Amino acid sequence: MSQQTLDNVFQEWQSNEALAEQMVPLLGRLYRQNNIVATIFGRSLINRSVIRILKNHRFVRKVEGTDLSVQDTYPIIKAMSELNLGPAHVDVGKLGVAFKNQGGGDVEAFLRKELHEIIDGYRPGASTGEPKDVVLYGFGRIGRLLARIMVDKAGGGNLLRLRAIVVRGRGDVAKDLEKRASLLRRDSVHGAFNGTISMDAEARTLTVNGNVVQVIYANSPSEIDYTDYGIDNAVVVDNTGMWRDEAGLGQHLECKGVSKALLTAPGKGDIKNIVFGINHGDISEDDRILSAASCTTNAIVPVLKVLNDEYGVVTGHVETVHAYTNDQNLIDNYHKGDRRGRSAALNMVLTETGAASAAAKALPELAGKLTGNAIRVPIPNVSMAILNLTLEKGTDVEGLNDYLRRMSIDSAYQKQIDFVDSTEVVSSDFVGNRHAGIVDAKATITNGNHAVVYVWYDNEFGYSCQVVRILQQMSNVSFLKLPRAAV
Protein backbone atom coordinates (compact mmCIF):
# COMPACT_ATOMS: atom_id res chain seq x y z
CA MET A 1 0.00 0.00 0.00
CA SER A 2 1.46 3.36 -1.04
CA GLN A 3 2.07 6.22 1.35
CA GLN A 4 -0.56 8.24 -0.50
CA THR A 5 -3.13 5.53 0.11
CA LEU A 6 -2.18 5.33 3.77
CA ASP A 7 -2.51 9.11 4.09
CA ASN A 8 -5.93 9.04 2.41
CA VAL A 9 -7.21 6.35 4.79
CA PHE A 10 -6.03 8.34 7.80
CA GLN A 11 -7.49 11.58 6.44
CA GLU A 12 -10.85 9.84 5.95
CA TRP A 13 -10.73 8.67 9.58
CA GLN A 14 -9.97 12.20 10.78
CA SER A 15 -12.80 13.58 8.68
CA ASN A 16 -15.22 11.06 10.18
CA GLU A 17 -14.00 11.93 13.68
CA ALA A 18 -14.63 15.60 13.00
CA LEU A 19 -18.19 14.91 11.81
CA ALA A 20 -18.87 12.70 14.83
CA GLU A 21 -17.67 15.53 17.08
CA GLN A 22 -20.15 17.85 15.38
CA MET A 23 -22.89 15.27 15.97
CA VAL A 24 -22.46 15.22 19.73
CA PRO A 25 -24.03 18.65 20.56
CA LEU A 26 -26.80 18.09 18.02
CA LEU A 27 -27.67 14.74 19.59
CA GLY A 28 -27.52 16.30 23.05
CA ARG A 29 -29.95 19.09 22.13
CA LEU A 30 -32.37 16.67 20.49
CA TYR A 31 -32.25 14.56 23.65
CA ARG A 32 -32.71 17.32 26.22
CA GLN A 33 -34.95 19.73 24.33
CA ASN A 34 -37.11 17.36 22.27
CA ASN A 35 -36.78 14.07 24.16
CA ILE A 36 -35.41 12.40 21.04
CA VAL A 37 -33.35 9.28 21.78
CA ALA A 38 -31.23 8.67 18.69
CA THR A 39 -29.86 5.21 17.94
CA ILE A 40 -27.99 3.26 15.26
CA PHE A 41 -29.81 -0.04 14.79
CA GLY A 42 -30.68 -0.04 18.48
CA ARG A 43 -27.26 1.23 19.68
CA SER A 44 -27.72 4.47 21.56
CA LEU A 45 -25.94 7.62 20.42
CA ILE A 46 -26.78 9.56 23.59
CA ASN A 47 -23.88 10.47 25.89
CA ARG A 48 -21.51 8.43 23.75
CA SER A 49 -17.91 9.19 22.87
CA VAL A 50 -16.79 10.02 19.34
CA ILE A 51 -15.17 6.60 19.01
CA ARG A 52 -18.31 4.85 20.25
CA ILE A 53 -20.40 6.74 17.69
CA LEU A 54 -18.05 5.60 14.93
CA LYS A 55 -18.14 1.99 16.21
CA ASN A 56 -21.95 2.06 16.25
CA HIS A 57 -21.87 3.04 12.58
CA ARG A 58 -19.48 0.20 11.85
CA PHE A 59 -21.95 -2.20 13.47
CA VAL A 60 -24.39 -1.63 10.59
CA ARG A 61 -22.22 -3.65 8.21
CA LYS A 62 -22.56 -6.67 10.49
CA VAL A 63 -26.36 -6.62 10.65
CA GLU A 64 -27.29 -5.11 7.30
CA GLY A 65 -24.36 -6.05 5.10
CA THR A 66 -23.99 -2.44 4.00
CA ASP A 67 -21.64 0.36 5.00
CA LEU A 68 -23.04 3.35 6.85
CA SER A 69 -20.78 6.20 7.90
CA VAL A 70 -21.18 9.51 9.70
CA GLN A 71 -21.06 11.06 6.24
CA ASP A 72 -24.46 9.40 5.69
CA THR A 73 -26.06 10.13 9.05
CA TYR A 74 -24.75 13.61 9.87
CA PRO A 75 -27.05 15.35 7.31
CA ILE A 76 -30.00 13.43 8.80
CA ILE A 77 -29.17 14.40 12.39
CA LYS A 78 -28.56 18.01 11.40
CA ALA A 79 -31.90 18.18 9.57
CA MET A 80 -33.65 16.59 12.55
CA SER A 81 -32.20 19.28 14.83
CA GLU A 82 -33.78 21.94 12.61
CA LEU A 83 -37.25 20.38 12.71
CA ASN A 84 -39.75 20.81 15.54
CA LEU A 85 -39.93 17.18 16.63
CA GLY A 86 -41.94 15.55 19.39
CA PRO A 87 -40.64 12.85 21.77
CA ALA A 88 -39.60 9.55 20.18
CA HIS A 89 -36.89 6.95 19.86
CA VAL A 90 -35.48 7.48 16.37
CA ASP A 91 -33.16 5.00 14.68
CA VAL A 92 -31.03 7.26 12.48
CA GLY A 93 -29.14 4.17 11.30
CA LYS A 94 -32.26 2.75 9.68
CA LEU A 95 -33.11 6.18 8.29
CA GLY A 96 -29.59 6.46 6.87
CA VAL A 97 -29.79 3.07 5.13
CA ALA A 98 -33.25 3.85 3.72
CA PHE A 99 -32.08 7.25 2.47
CA LYS A 100 -29.05 5.68 0.77
CA ASN A 101 -31.19 2.96 -0.80
CA GLN A 102 -33.51 5.54 -2.35
CA GLY A 103 -30.52 7.29 -3.87
CA GLY A 104 -30.40 10.33 -1.56
CA GLY A 105 -32.21 13.53 -2.44
CA ASP A 106 -33.92 16.09 -0.24
CA VAL A 107 -33.13 15.14 3.38
CA GLU A 108 -35.84 17.32 4.91
CA ALA A 109 -38.52 15.96 2.60
CA PHE A 110 -37.40 12.42 3.41
CA LEU A 111 -37.60 13.09 7.16
CA ARG A 112 -40.98 14.78 6.90
CA LYS A 113 -42.27 11.57 5.36
CA GLU A 114 -40.53 9.11 7.70
CA LEU A 115 -41.09 11.13 10.90
CA HIS A 116 -44.46 12.63 10.04
CA GLU A 117 -45.96 11.37 13.32
CA ILE A 118 -43.73 13.68 15.38
CA ILE A 119 -43.20 16.61 12.99
CA ASP A 120 -44.41 19.76 14.79
CA GLY A 121 -45.51 17.41 17.55
CA TYR A 122 -43.57 18.96 20.39
CA ARG A 123 -45.47 21.13 22.85
CA PRO A 124 -43.65 22.67 25.84
CA GLY A 125 -44.77 20.89 28.98
CA ALA A 126 -46.13 17.87 27.14
CA SER A 127 -44.93 14.44 28.22
CA THR A 128 -45.63 10.78 27.65
CA GLY A 129 -46.45 10.15 31.29
CA GLU A 130 -46.26 11.59 34.77
CA PRO A 131 -43.02 11.89 36.79
CA LYS A 132 -42.65 8.88 39.06
CA ASP A 133 -40.62 8.64 42.26
CA VAL A 134 -38.54 5.46 42.47
CA VAL A 135 -37.03 3.93 45.62
CA LEU A 136 -34.42 1.18 45.49
CA TYR A 137 -34.89 -1.14 48.45
CA GLY A 138 -31.47 -2.77 48.60
CA PHE A 139 -28.33 -1.48 46.94
CA GLY A 140 -26.42 -4.56 45.81
CA ARG A 141 -25.41 -5.58 42.28
CA ILE A 142 -28.80 -4.95 40.64
CA GLY A 143 -29.64 -1.93 42.78
CA ARG A 144 -26.45 -0.08 41.84
CA LEU A 145 -26.87 -0.86 38.14
CA LEU A 146 -30.47 0.36 38.25
CA ALA A 147 -29.19 3.58 39.80
CA ARG A 148 -26.63 3.98 37.01
CA ILE A 149 -29.22 3.42 34.30
CA MET A 150 -31.84 5.75 35.77
CA VAL A 151 -29.32 8.53 36.30
CA ASP A 152 -28.06 8.05 32.74
CA LYS A 153 -31.62 8.41 31.42
CA ALA A 154 -32.63 11.32 33.63
CA GLY A 155 -31.82 14.04 31.11
CA GLY A 156 -34.19 13.09 28.31
CA GLY A 157 -37.73 13.04 29.63
CA ASN A 158 -37.52 9.55 31.09
CA LEU A 159 -39.63 10.78 34.04
CA LEU A 160 -38.33 8.13 36.44
CA ARG A 161 -36.87 10.01 39.40
CA LEU A 162 -34.51 8.06 41.63
CA ARG A 163 -35.39 9.57 44.99
CA ALA A 164 -33.99 7.18 47.58
CA ILE A 165 -32.17 3.96 48.37
CA VAL A 166 -32.88 1.89 51.47
CA VAL A 167 -30.07 -0.01 53.19
CA ARG A 168 -29.50 -1.52 56.59
CA GLY A 169 -27.83 0.65 59.22
CA ARG A 170 -24.06 0.23 59.45
CA GLY A 171 -23.16 2.46 62.40
CA ASP A 172 -21.03 5.40 61.26
CA VAL A 173 -23.16 7.16 58.63
CA ALA A 174 -20.29 9.09 57.07
CA LYS A 175 -18.22 5.95 56.55
CA ASP A 176 -21.21 4.03 55.30
CA LEU A 177 -22.04 6.72 52.72
CA GLU A 178 -18.43 6.74 51.57
CA LYS A 179 -18.65 3.00 50.99
CA ARG A 180 -21.96 3.27 49.14
CA ALA A 181 -20.57 6.03 46.95
CA SER A 182 -17.39 4.06 46.28
CA LEU A 183 -19.31 0.93 45.26
CA LEU A 184 -21.42 3.00 42.88
CA ARG A 185 -18.38 4.83 41.52
CA ARG A 186 -16.17 1.75 40.92
CA ASP A 187 -17.27 -1.63 39.67
CA SER A 188 -14.90 -4.52 38.98
CA VAL A 189 -17.17 -5.88 36.24
CA HIS A 190 -18.88 -2.86 34.72
CA GLY A 191 -16.11 -0.30 35.13
CA ALA A 192 -16.10 3.23 36.48
CA PHE A 193 -19.29 5.26 36.79
CA ASN A 194 -19.60 7.84 34.01
CA GLY A 195 -20.08 11.00 36.06
CA THR A 196 -19.68 12.52 39.48
CA ILE A 197 -20.83 11.41 42.91
CA SER A 198 -20.73 13.47 46.09
CA MET A 199 -22.08 12.81 49.57
CA ASP A 200 -23.60 14.81 52.40
CA ALA A 201 -23.32 12.90 55.69
CA GLU A 202 -25.55 15.32 57.60
CA ALA A 203 -28.38 15.15 55.08
CA ARG A 204 -27.66 11.46 54.38
CA THR A 205 -27.70 11.97 50.62
CA LEU A 206 -25.69 11.05 47.57
CA THR A 207 -25.72 13.48 44.65
CA VAL A 208 -25.21 11.53 41.45
CA ASN A 209 -24.80 13.60 38.28
CA GLY A 210 -26.98 16.27 39.85
CA ASN A 211 -29.61 13.81 41.13
CA VAL A 212 -30.00 14.08 44.90
CA VAL A 213 -30.69 10.61 46.28
CA GLN A 214 -31.76 10.12 49.89
CA VAL A 215 -30.12 7.22 51.75
CA ILE A 216 -32.57 5.73 54.23
CA TYR A 217 -31.34 3.37 56.92
CA ALA A 218 -33.91 0.76 57.98
CA ASN A 219 -34.10 -2.91 58.87
CA SER A 220 -37.65 -3.42 57.60
CA PRO A 221 -40.23 -1.53 55.52
CA SER A 222 -42.35 -0.90 58.61
CA GLU A 223 -39.73 1.58 59.88
CA ILE A 224 -40.10 3.96 56.90
CA ASP A 225 -42.42 6.86 56.16
CA TYR A 226 -41.34 8.03 52.71
CA THR A 227 -43.41 11.19 52.90
CA ASP A 228 -40.95 12.43 55.53
CA TYR A 229 -38.49 12.75 52.62
CA GLY A 230 -40.94 14.37 50.20
CA ILE A 231 -41.47 11.08 48.37
CA ASP A 232 -45.01 10.26 47.27
CA ASN A 233 -46.79 7.73 45.06
CA ALA A 234 -43.48 5.91 44.64
CA VAL A 235 -42.58 2.57 43.13
CA VAL A 236 -40.35 0.57 45.47
CA VAL A 237 -38.00 -1.74 43.61
CA ASP A 238 -37.12 -4.59 45.96
CA ASN A 239 -33.65 -5.89 45.09
CA THR A 240 -33.13 -7.92 48.25
CA GLY A 241 -35.00 -11.09 47.27
CA MET A 242 -36.02 -11.45 50.91
CA TRP A 243 -39.72 -11.55 50.00
CA ARG A 244 -41.20 -13.02 46.84
CA ASP A 245 -44.88 -13.35 47.69
CA GLU A 246 -47.69 -10.84 48.14
CA ALA A 247 -47.58 -11.04 51.92
CA GLY A 248 -43.90 -10.14 52.11
CA LEU A 249 -43.83 -7.55 49.34
CA GLY A 250 -47.07 -6.10 50.62
CA GLN A 251 -45.08 -4.62 53.51
CA HIS A 252 -43.82 -1.96 51.09
CA LEU A 253 -47.38 -0.94 50.21
CA GLU A 254 -48.14 -0.28 53.88
CA CYS A 255 -45.51 2.48 53.94
CA LYS A 256 -46.72 6.03 53.47
CA GLY A 257 -45.68 7.42 50.10
CA VAL A 258 -45.65 4.05 48.27
CA SER A 259 -48.12 3.06 45.57
CA LYS A 260 -46.50 0.02 43.96
CA ALA A 261 -43.72 -2.53 44.37
CA LEU A 262 -41.56 -4.28 41.79
CA LEU A 263 -39.52 -7.40 42.62
CA THR A 264 -36.24 -8.08 40.80
CA ALA A 265 -36.61 -11.84 41.12
CA PRO A 266 -39.25 -14.41 40.16
CA GLY A 267 -42.48 -13.81 42.05
CA LYS A 268 -44.47 -16.53 43.76
CA GLY A 269 -48.18 -17.21 43.87
CA ASP A 270 -50.39 -14.96 41.78
CA ILE A 271 -47.80 -12.21 41.27
CA LYS A 272 -47.46 -11.39 37.57
CA ASN A 273 -43.99 -12.21 36.25
CA ILE A 274 -43.30 -9.66 33.51
CA VAL A 275 -40.79 -10.01 30.69
CA PHE A 276 -40.77 -6.64 29.00
CA GLY A 277 -41.38 -6.93 25.27
CA ILE A 278 -43.48 -10.06 25.75
CA ASN A 279 -46.24 -9.61 28.31
CA HIS A 280 -45.77 -6.05 29.57
CA GLY A 281 -49.19 -5.33 28.07
CA ASP A 282 -50.65 -7.41 30.91
CA ILE A 283 -49.71 -4.68 33.40
CA SER A 284 -52.83 -2.85 34.54
CA GLU A 285 -53.33 0.22 36.69
CA ASP A 286 -54.68 -2.07 39.41
CA ASP A 287 -51.47 -4.09 39.68
CA ARG A 288 -49.69 -3.00 42.84
CA ILE A 289 -47.11 -5.78 43.06
CA LEU A 290 -45.22 -7.09 40.04
CA SER A 291 -42.16 -9.22 39.37
CA ALA A 292 -39.53 -8.65 36.69
CA ALA A 293 -38.96 -12.43 36.62
CA SER A 294 -35.34 -13.64 36.45
CA CYS A 295 -32.42 -12.67 34.24
CA THR A 296 -32.55 -16.08 32.54
CA THR A 297 -36.29 -15.90 31.92
CA ASN A 298 -35.82 -12.46 30.35
CA ALA A 299 -33.03 -13.81 28.15
CA ILE A 300 -34.82 -16.86 26.78
CA VAL A 301 -38.48 -15.84 26.50
CA PRO A 302 -38.12 -13.29 23.66
CA VAL A 303 -36.10 -15.78 21.57
CA LEU A 304 -38.54 -18.58 22.37
CA LYS A 305 -41.43 -16.29 21.44
CA VAL A 306 -40.17 -15.51 17.95
CA LEU A 307 -39.10 -19.11 17.34
CA ASN A 308 -42.50 -20.37 18.41
CA ASP A 309 -44.25 -17.80 16.21
CA GLU A 310 -42.29 -18.83 13.11
CA TYR A 311 -41.51 -22.52 13.60
CA GLY A 312 -43.63 -23.75 16.51
CA VAL A 313 -41.96 -25.23 19.60
CA VAL A 314 -43.02 -28.81 20.33
CA THR A 315 -40.68 -29.53 23.25
CA GLY A 316 -37.39 -28.22 24.52
CA HIS A 317 -34.72 -28.18 27.20
CA VAL A 318 -33.02 -25.04 28.51
CA GLU A 319 -29.54 -25.50 29.93
CA THR A 320 -28.16 -22.39 31.61
CA VAL A 321 -24.43 -21.81 32.01
CA HIS A 322 -24.61 -19.07 34.62
CA ALA A 323 -22.04 -16.77 36.20
CA TYR A 324 -21.71 -17.22 39.95
CA THR A 325 -23.66 -14.86 42.18
CA ASN A 326 -23.27 -13.34 45.62
CA ASP A 327 -25.48 -16.09 47.02
CA GLN A 328 -22.66 -18.64 46.61
CA ASN A 329 -19.62 -19.11 48.82
CA LEU A 330 -16.13 -18.01 47.81
CA ILE A 331 -14.69 -21.06 49.60
CA ASP A 332 -16.39 -24.21 50.85
CA ASN A 333 -18.75 -23.40 53.69
CA TYR A 334 -22.24 -24.15 54.93
CA HIS A 335 -25.08 -23.22 52.54
CA LYS A 336 -28.72 -24.24 52.84
CA GLY A 337 -28.89 -24.87 49.08
CA ASP A 338 -27.65 -28.07 47.47
CA ARG A 339 -24.05 -27.78 46.18
CA ARG A 340 -23.99 -23.96 46.49
CA GLY A 341 -21.82 -24.20 49.60
CA ARG A 342 -18.88 -25.32 47.46
CA SER A 343 -16.42 -22.70 46.26
CA ALA A 344 -17.92 -20.63 43.43
CA ALA A 345 -14.48 -19.60 42.21
CA LEU A 346 -13.15 -23.15 41.95
CA ASN A 347 -16.04 -25.26 40.72
CA MET A 348 -18.73 -25.74 38.15
CA VAL A 349 -21.79 -26.12 40.35
CA LEU A 350 -24.81 -28.02 39.11
CA THR A 351 -27.98 -26.40 40.40
CA GLU A 352 -31.61 -25.88 39.55
CA THR A 353 -33.29 -23.10 37.58
CA GLY A 354 -36.93 -22.18 37.45
CA ALA A 355 -36.50 -20.33 34.17
CA ALA A 356 -38.06 -23.04 32.01
CA SER A 357 -41.24 -23.23 34.05
CA ALA A 358 -41.23 -19.46 34.60
CA ALA A 359 -41.14 -18.93 30.84
CA ALA A 360 -44.68 -20.29 30.67
CA LYS A 361 -45.89 -17.53 33.00
CA ALA A 362 -44.87 -14.95 30.43
CA LEU A 363 -45.58 -17.18 27.42
CA PRO A 364 -48.50 -19.50 28.30
CA GLU A 365 -48.35 -21.30 24.94
CA LEU A 366 -45.13 -22.95 26.13
CA ALA A 367 -46.68 -24.39 29.30
CA GLY A 368 -45.50 -27.96 29.87
CA LYS A 369 -43.16 -27.93 26.86
CA LEU A 370 -39.84 -27.01 28.49
CA THR A 371 -37.47 -28.50 31.04
CA GLY A 372 -34.45 -26.76 32.51
CA ASN A 373 -31.28 -27.01 34.54
CA ALA A 374 -28.31 -24.79 35.35
CA ILE A 375 -24.57 -24.90 35.89
CA ARG A 376 -22.89 -22.10 37.85
CA VAL A 377 -19.39 -21.43 36.50
CA PRO A 378 -16.40 -19.47 37.86
CA ILE A 379 -16.94 -16.12 36.11
CA PRO A 380 -18.48 -13.02 37.75
CA ASN A 381 -20.89 -11.96 35.01
CA VAL A 382 -22.46 -12.88 31.64
CA SER A 383 -24.26 -16.17 31.25
CA MET A 384 -25.51 -18.37 28.43
CA ALA A 385 -28.74 -20.24 27.81
CA ILE A 386 -28.69 -23.21 25.44
CA LEU A 387 -32.11 -23.79 23.88
CA ASN A 388 -32.39 -27.39 22.69
CA LEU A 389 -35.67 -27.44 20.76
CA THR A 390 -37.88 -29.70 18.70
CA LEU A 391 -39.81 -27.60 16.20
CA GLU A 392 -42.98 -28.18 14.20
CA LYS A 393 -41.32 -26.91 11.01
CA GLY A 394 -37.87 -27.90 9.84
CA THR A 395 -35.24 -25.33 8.98
CA ASP A 396 -31.54 -24.94 8.27
CA VAL A 397 -28.84 -22.89 9.99
CA GLU A 398 -28.86 -20.12 7.39
CA GLY A 399 -32.64 -19.72 7.43
CA LEU A 400 -32.91 -19.83 11.22
CA ASN A 401 -30.08 -17.33 11.71
CA ASP A 402 -31.40 -14.96 9.08
CA TYR A 403 -34.80 -14.98 10.76
CA LEU A 404 -33.32 -14.27 14.19
CA ARG A 405 -31.11 -11.51 12.72
CA ARG A 406 -34.17 -9.83 11.22
CA MET A 407 -36.01 -10.12 14.52
CA SER A 408 -33.08 -8.40 16.25
CA ILE A 409 -33.01 -5.35 13.98
CA ASP A 410 -36.51 -4.86 12.65
CA SER A 411 -39.16 -6.17 14.99
CA ALA A 412 -40.97 -5.28 18.19
CA TYR A 413 -38.31 -7.29 20.04
CA GLN A 414 -35.32 -5.18 18.97
CA LYS A 415 -34.45 -4.16 22.52
CA GLN A 416 -34.81 -7.71 23.81
CA ILE A 417 -32.97 -9.72 21.13
CA ASP A 418 -29.45 -8.95 19.95
CA PHE A 419 -27.52 -10.91 17.34
CA VAL A 420 -23.81 -11.62 16.88
CA ASP A 421 -22.14 -13.49 14.03
CA SER A 422 -18.49 -13.93 14.97
CA THR A 423 -16.23 -16.90 15.63
CA GLU A 424 -14.20 -14.93 18.19
CA VAL A 425 -16.69 -13.65 20.78
CA VAL A 426 -16.52 -14.82 24.41
CA SER A 427 -18.51 -13.99 27.52
CA SER A 428 -16.66 -10.81 28.49
CA ASP A 429 -17.56 -9.25 25.13
CA PHE A 430 -21.16 -8.95 26.33
CA VAL A 431 -20.57 -7.10 29.60
CA GLY A 432 -22.78 -4.01 29.49
CA ASN A 433 -25.02 -5.27 26.68
CA ARG A 434 -28.47 -3.71 27.13
CA HIS A 435 -30.44 -6.48 25.47
CA ALA A 436 -32.18 -9.27 27.36
CA GLY A 437 -30.32 -11.86 25.27
CA ILE A 438 -27.85 -12.13 22.38
CA VAL A 439 -28.15 -14.91 19.80
CA ASP A 440 -24.76 -16.42 18.86
CA ALA A 441 -25.24 -17.23 15.18
CA LYS A 442 -22.02 -19.18 14.79
CA ALA A 443 -23.14 -21.67 17.44
CA THR A 444 -26.58 -22.42 15.92
CA ILE A 445 -27.19 -26.08 15.10
CA THR A 446 -30.08 -27.54 13.08
CA ASN A 447 -31.07 -31.02 12.00
CA GLY A 448 -34.44 -31.10 10.34
CA ASN A 449 -36.99 -30.25 13.02
CA HIS A 450 -34.34 -30.07 15.71
CA ALA A 451 -32.51 -26.83 16.58
CA VAL A 452 -30.01 -25.71 19.20
CA VAL A 453 -29.77 -21.96 19.76
CA TYR A 454 -27.17 -20.35 22.03
CA VAL A 455 -28.17 -17.14 23.80
CA TRP A 456 -25.69 -14.99 25.74
CA TYR A 457 -26.91 -12.48 28.32
CA ASP A 458 -25.47 -9.99 30.76
CA ASN A 459 -27.32 -11.35 33.75
CA GLU A 460 -26.71 -8.09 35.63
CA PHE A 461 -26.84 -5.14 33.23
CA GLY A 462 -29.08 -6.53 30.49
CA TYR A 463 -31.55 -7.67 33.13
CA SER A 464 -31.43 -4.26 34.86
CA CYS A 465 -32.32 -2.60 31.55
CA GLN A 466 -35.39 -4.83 31.35
CA VAL A 467 -36.36 -3.81 34.90
CA VAL A 468 -36.16 -0.12 33.96
CA ARG A 469 -38.40 -0.79 30.94
CA ILE A 470 -41.00 -2.30 33.28
CA LEU A 471 -40.70 0.76 35.53
CA GLN A 472 -41.41 2.95 32.52
CA GLN A 473 -44.46 0.87 31.66
CA MET A 474 -45.72 1.08 35.25
CA SER A 475 -45.30 4.86 35.06
CA ASN A 476 -47.06 5.15 31.68
CA VAL A 477 -43.83 6.38 30.11
CA SER A 478 -43.81 5.43 26.43
CA PHE A 479 -42.25 6.71 23.24
CA LEU A 480 -42.91 6.18 19.58
CA LYS A 481 -40.20 4.11 17.91
CA LEU A 482 -39.39 5.40 14.42
CA PRO A 483 -39.08 4.38 11.69
CA ARG A 484 -41.79 1.81 12.26
CA ALA A 485 -40.68 -1.81 12.47
CA ALA A 486 -41.27 -3.77 9.27
CA VAL A 487 -42.57 -6.81 11.18
Image (cartoon, rainbow, N blue to C red):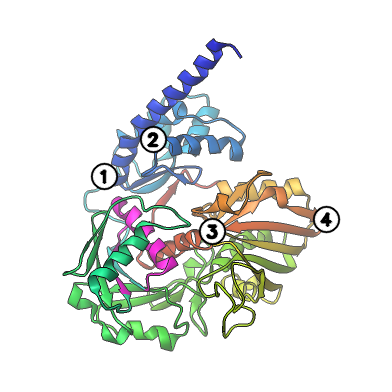
Callout 2: few (<14), some (14-19), or many (20+) C-alpha neighbours within 10 Å?
some
Q: Which mark is residue 33?
A: 1
Q: Amino acid at mark 4?
A: Asn
Callout 3: few (<14), some (14-19), or many (20+) C-alpha neighbours within 10 Å?
many
Mark with earlier residue (3, 4): 4
> For mark 3, what is the residue?
458
Q: Which residues are magenta?
A: 138-166
Q: Is residue 399 above or below residue 92?
A: below
Where residue 319 sits, quadrant-wise, is bottom right
Residue 208 appears in the figure: yes
> For mark 4, what is the residue?
447
Callout 1: few (<14), some (14-19), or many (20+) C-alpha neighbours within 10 Å?
some
Q: Which mark is residue 112?
A: 2
Q: Which of pointers 3 and 1 indicates the residue nearer the eye?
A: 3
- Rendered residue at 79%/54% (across/down): 446
Callout 4: helix, strand or loop?
strand
